[in-house]
Amino acid sequence: MKILAIESSCDDTAVAVTEGRRVLSSCIASQVPEHVLYGGVVPEIASRRHIEAIGSLYSRALEQAGCALDDIDAVAVTYAPGLIGSLLVGVGFAKGLCFAKGIPLIPVHHLRSHIAANYITAPELEPPFLALVISGGHSHLIDVRDYTSYEVIGRTRDDAAGECFDKTARAMGMPYPGGIHLDKLAESGDNTKYKLPCPHVEGCELDFSFSGLKTAVINLIHNAEQKGEQLDFASLAACVRKTVTDILIDRVVKAFERLPYDKLVIAGGVSANSEIRRRMAELMREKGKKLYLPELTYCGDNAAMVGVQGYYEYLAGNTAGNDLNAFATMDIATLM
Ligand code: KG4
Ligand code: ZN
């Protein structure tokens, strides 16, 4: 079964063709060069760029997969959560294709698809497992019981891990999105130089809170600026990265005290972080559990992961009619 998949939830327009877990093509148009001017995503601009990019990406994805629209059996599309104007571009395009060809329309939740990126990288991976989804907008610990059955067991109370990286990186003068730049700079820093807060959520040991850490770093930078002091940004970056990793490790260890699983799956843009990858691998080795990480190309937003999750949604009967809408927020456990 060949699926044409579309992703437009934030600032990447992406179209792919997949068959089961196999990726036949995966095309992405990034909008970063434009949003970098504003230090973050401008939703109005993002929607307009999706509209401009989606038609040619669609043609390229079909061409690279060596097929035509007639060979496509269904269309999968990210419909929630995300920027509403951005999501609507992908959903509208997908509906047009399904209406024209009379083929099924498969709505896909963005976080479900991030988890599915691991099915591409590890063909043997099957649920159940514990998933840590860390992206620019989300930080969740999820009990993945089956391909379409989830329970959120921990979540951020405020900012996502990616937001914490991006905003602290911006305060240090790095371009948007700062996570990757902070990661690189941290390699040459001393991760013991600055003392940063490592917040817990009272009574909810699996929840995260990153806003206190973000604010502490921004205040440290502003105070130093006011006093005319020069901070060692490589070491500050290393301390931020270590603190975020410490927090994630603490929650993963506690989650495994509750769940009987022997597999940890990490997903979302922040799963590209080199310290998180390194230290989670050490932790899982110590615990005798298996770690799954997406290939770097599938950590960030892409449509291949949407196609693969779309396949499992289709098998579960989760298709939609031409009245499908997009939603800015939606829990991962919600059934269509
Ligand atoms: O999943 P994603 O592409 O978009 C969302 O669904 O949010 O994640 C983007 C996030 C951004 O915050 C970006 O800075 C972060 O992933 N990111 C990283 C790294 N690469 C991307 N954060 C830390 N270290 C990295 N190497
Ligand atoms: Zn994402």
Image: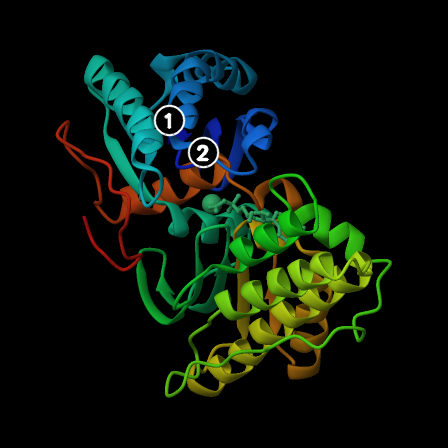
Q: For residue 19, which quarter of the picture?
A: top left
**Along the line of sight, which residue is nearer the eye, 65 or 57?**
57
Q: Is mark 2 within 8 Å of ligand 2?
A: no
C-alpha distance separating marks 1 and 2: 33 Å
The quadrant the N terminus occupies is top left
| Residue visible at 35% across and 38% down in the picture | 83
The image position of residue 325, as x and y in percent, is 19, 35
**Along the line of sight, which residue is nearer the eye, 188 or 213?**
213
Under mark 1, the amino acid is Glu
Q: Residues within 10 Å of mark 2 (few under 14, many from 20)?
A: some
The image position of residue 82, as x and y in percent, is 35, 42
Q: Nearer the viewer, mark 1 or mark 2?
A: 1
Quickly name the residue at label 2: 19
**Identity of the residue furthest to the right in this view:** 188
Q: Residues within 10 Å of mark 1 (few under 14, many from 20)?
A: few
Residue 13, above or below 228: above
Residue 74, above or below 307: above
Under mark 2, the amino acid is Glu
Q: For residue 240, which quarter of the picture?
A: bottom right
| Residue visible at 15% across and 27% down in the picture | 322
Quickly name the residue at label 1: 44
Element on which disc 1 rests: helix
Question: Which labelled disc corresponds to residue 138?
Answer: none
